[in-house]
Image (cartoon, rainbow, N blue to C red):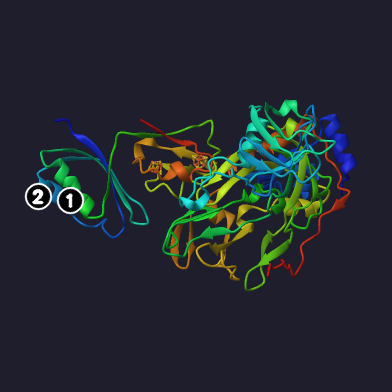
Amino acid sequence: MDKTYAEINAKIKEGKAVVVTAAELIELVAEKGLAQAAREVDVVTTGTFGPMCSSGVFLNFGHSAPRIKMHRLWLNNVPAYTGIAAVDAYLGATEVPEDDPLNSTYPGEFWYGGGHVIQDLVARKPIHLKATGYGTDCYPRRKIETTLTLDDINEAVLFNPRNAYQNYNCAVNLSNRTIYTYMGMLKPGLGNAHYSTSGQLSPLLKDPYFKTIGLGTRIFLGGGIGYVAWHGTQHLPFIQRDVNGNELGPSGGTLMVIGDLKQMDPRWLVGTSYLGYGATLSVGIGIPIPILNEEIARFAAAADEELYAPIVDYGEAYPNRLPGNLGYVSYAQLKSGKIMVNGKEVPTAPLSSYPRALEIANLLKEWIQKGKFLLAEPVQLLPPPSDQPTPAILK
Amino acid sequence: MAPKKVVLRFSADIADKPIIYRLVKDYDLIINILKANVNPQKEGTMVLEVIGDLYAAGLDYLRRQGVVVQDLTQEIVRNEDLCTDCGACTAICPTGALYLKRPSMEVQFDSDACVVCYLCLKACPVRAMEVRF
Ligand code: SF4
Ligand code: SF4
């Protein structure tokens, strides 16, 4: 008994749609069986909240009198890219001030960067703008310094080239010194293991073959409504397998997402600093999965026990791009607090917030139940997993 | 003379040496152990109340042994408004003062177990851990 987007949306409008979070679906399937759960449930909500470096915002400030063609631009001292039209700019999440000591005082602290400016913008804090121009006949002004808030400018569009990574490495450190990475502080000699997805709640782990997620899918983005714009950069999905060929869940898919920053919320776009690595932005994303058929329900019901992350050494293997990994570990094991790596018990910790991911899945569920959020049928699905993902190598 | 509170931090290679015994025996210090913890990586932390004439000499002895010694005049607090419950601090904190509640995966902070080692201050990606003087 398959369902269509139109049928599900009709139920949402009537307030009759059955919406559960991915965590609730797992319980429902255990209780009633897959076929029954697939019949009953219309929409499953997912969520993730964690650092996503490939994020940023397109801004249009409106024109000054006289006009300026911004050649260089700083927002709260953080440079933004101006190589587009006169008062358009793109501020990236990992940009830092030119006078930041970076890693010259190792490990650098990266207190404030593009991600923090984005959070301050969304929080409606005053932002200091400084821009210089070289002066043209049509744009004579050479300098402007002013203070603005998000409400003062024409547009602010969050446009993130790569978000919501389907799966991620479990990072460890085999070297004999503490290292500071985008996976946090990793103590020497397998002192700790860090992982970074919400596992059974994580959007792209719940639709491994991209049967429902595609261009135009309406999503929860940064506390507001956003859309999937394209597949993300480095979208190279595949199904992980162990040495015996058993499936270990998907990996490698990513999303490019877009949404109006003005309706977002600073709780779900948080400026973030990784010691010794840099500044970034923690982004909250939630994706609704329409249960069109039983197969889609089966994938959406994958539990932490069935989803695996590869264990990767960030001391030597990752930075030098050495192939292979130290084995796979399930999200159930990762969440238990300890895993075994090379015969040693290693304490684990997440970098992505499970409580916040759950809050997103619940918020999205509430929006749909109240009829405030309708499903959008994608105009084109994302490229599905391939048997041979071939990432480019920069030579 | 009032007792002073100090935090001692040991690496794995000195955690099993009888240094507290020497403080009492050789430096005639009166010692009250307020907190003591050895984590699974065998790094030790201890909070002591110390009183005695040879206080400074005793602490110098500890430093010579490779113990990190620090006055305990500060307190670490978690700013609940900033904390996102990410968990990034929980495998860094040497005493388990920051830990995950399961299965909800909410991050808990037990300030009684905190030995003010400052590790979480910089490891927290949103700087939610703060020093209070
Ligand atoms: S200062 Fe932070 S890391 Fe150190 S013991 Fe206290 S809570 Fe743990
Ligand atoms: S690292 Fe910071 S934000 Fe994350 S749980 Fe610990 S205190 Fe909270």
Mark 1 element type: helix
Which chain's residue wears label 1?
Answer: B
Residue at the (83%, 40%) spot, across then down? A375
Q: Where is residue A18 in the image (x, y as percent from the top left)?
A: 77, 37
Residue B26: mark in rendering: 2
| Residue depth check, mark 2 versus mark 1: number of the one nearer the observer | 1
Relative to A151, is B85 above or below? below
Quadrant housing residue A392: bottom right
- Depth check: A23 or A223 in front? A223
The C terminus of chain A sits in image quarter: bottom right
Residue A187: mark in rendering: none
Q: Position of residue A9 (x, y in %)?
A: 86, 37
Quadrant housing residue A246: bottom right
Relative to A294, is A220 above or below? above
Residue at the (62%, 47%) spot, across then down? A94
Quadrant housing residue A211: bottom right
Q: Is mark 2 within 8 Å of ligand 1?
A: no
* Residue at mark 1: B61
- Depth check: A87 or A319 in front? A87
Q: What residue type is labelled 2?
A: Asp
Are the residues tagged 2 and 1 within 8 Å (C-beta)?
Answer: yes
* Same-chain check, marks 2 and 1: yes
Q: What residue type is labelled 1?
A: Tyr
Residue at the (33%, 54%) spot, across then down? B43
Tell me if I can see residue A219 in this picture.
no
Query: Badge 1 local density, few (<14 within 10 Å), some, or many (20+)?
Result: some
Mark 2 to mark 1 CA distance (whole Å):
10 Å
